[in-house]
Structure formats: C-alpha cells, structure tokens
Image (cartoon, helix red, strand yellow):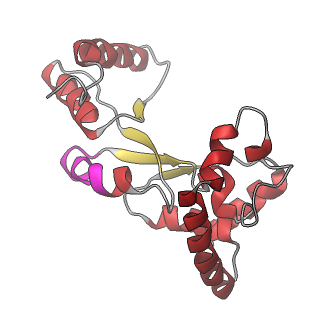
Amino acid sequence: MTHQELRFPRYMEEIVRAFTHVINQGWAMYWGTSRWNAMEIMEAHSVARQFNLIPPIAEQAEYHLFQREKVELSMPELYNKIGIGTMTWSPLACGILTGKYDDGVPIYSRAATKGYGWLKDKILCEEGRRQQSKLREVAGIADKLGCTLAQLSIAWCLKNENVQCVLLGAASVDQLYEDIQALQ
C-alpha cells in the first residue's frame, strides 16, 4: 500500500478505538465512514478484527446516474466480504438530475448562488452539456413512467441492492414530498 492509497495509516487504530469508545459509552449505536476508499474501509475492518474493536458498518458515498464508479465498481467486494452497507448522498447531483439546468443556470438556483461557482462551472462545461443531453433522454423515460426526472433518479439509486439508504437534501416541503414519491 502506498501513502496515496491509504490517507491515514498511522491513525487507523486510533480512529477505530475512538469509535468503539463512543459506542461503548452509549453515545452512538454504530459508526460509518464518509468518502473513504475501499482500502481504508478494509484497513479499519482489519484493525477492528485484530484488536476486538467495532468496525464501521456503512460507507457514505456520492451516488447518482453520473457518479457510479465507487458504489458499483470499487465497493462490491466489501459488500460481500465484510458486509458493509452504503448510505448514498446527492442522488440528484446537486439538482442537475432535476432537469432545472436544461437551459442554463436559472438565477434562483443553487448554481447561481455565491460560493457555488464550482457547480455552475460543472453545469456549463462541455461534460455538463453532454450530461444535460443524456438527461433529456432520461426525462423521456420518466414521462413514460409517469414520474418526474427527480423521482426516477432517486428510485434508480434505491433500486441498487447495495444501497441501504439515500440521503435527500430537499430545499422545501414540496420538494421533499416530490422526492418521497420516488418510493412508488
């Protein structure tokens, strides 16, 4: 293993011991990782097994139609080998998968907000335009199914048998209601 593959090799035992302490104190029931790579998760699991500590039970990973590699290619061995689950976030890719950026960046959108220039750049770049083109095809499928693009995108995430939870970030009650309809 190189240092690039494992970001905190010297601290892994400390991290696992700390989370085991938190659980043993009754402050939490479980612990998980967020944005760790498969090698780091496996190292945490190995340390837990070696020292009779509590391993992580879930990885929180970005997952949507345009961000699939980690959940579908990097993690499957861990699902089967150590039984780790996946809590996914950003099922709508910061709103990109709602279709609201079809014709550019609306002034009321997150991508137009100060501090979100990175999102605006992502939408307006060549790859972003290709994604918008693909989304038009997906929107046609959503129409045929009688749902919104957002609902189809969330349902698609939920359909993956290795995804136990999809974290939503609704900006309003109406948006949350629409998102929850993806369960149907």
Q: Residue at x 19, y 21 (%)?
A: 52
Q: Is residue 53 visible?
A: yes
* Residue displayed at 58% across by 62% down: 154
Q: Is residue 130 left or right of residue 112?
A: left
Give the quadrant of residue 129: bottom right
In the image, farthest residue toward the right:
108
Q: Nearer the viewer, residue 183 or 4?
A: 4
- Magenta segment: 73-83
- Residue 23: x %, y % from top left: 41, 20
What secondary structure is the stretch in magenta mostly built from?
helix
Residue 60 on the magenta segment: no
**Count of residue discs:** 0
Q: Nearer the viewer, residue 101 or 182?
A: 101
Residue 7 x, y percent position in the rendering: 30, 23
Residue shown at 64% from the left, 83% from the top? 140
Vertical order, 30 against 65 (above or below): above
The residue most toward the bottom is 144
Can you see residue 75? no
Q: Residue furthest front?
A: 126
Q: Quadrant of the N terminus?
A: top left
User: Residue, x 29% and y 29% (percent of image)?
Assistant: 55
Position of residue 16 measured from the top left corner of the image (x, y, whole percent): 30, 19
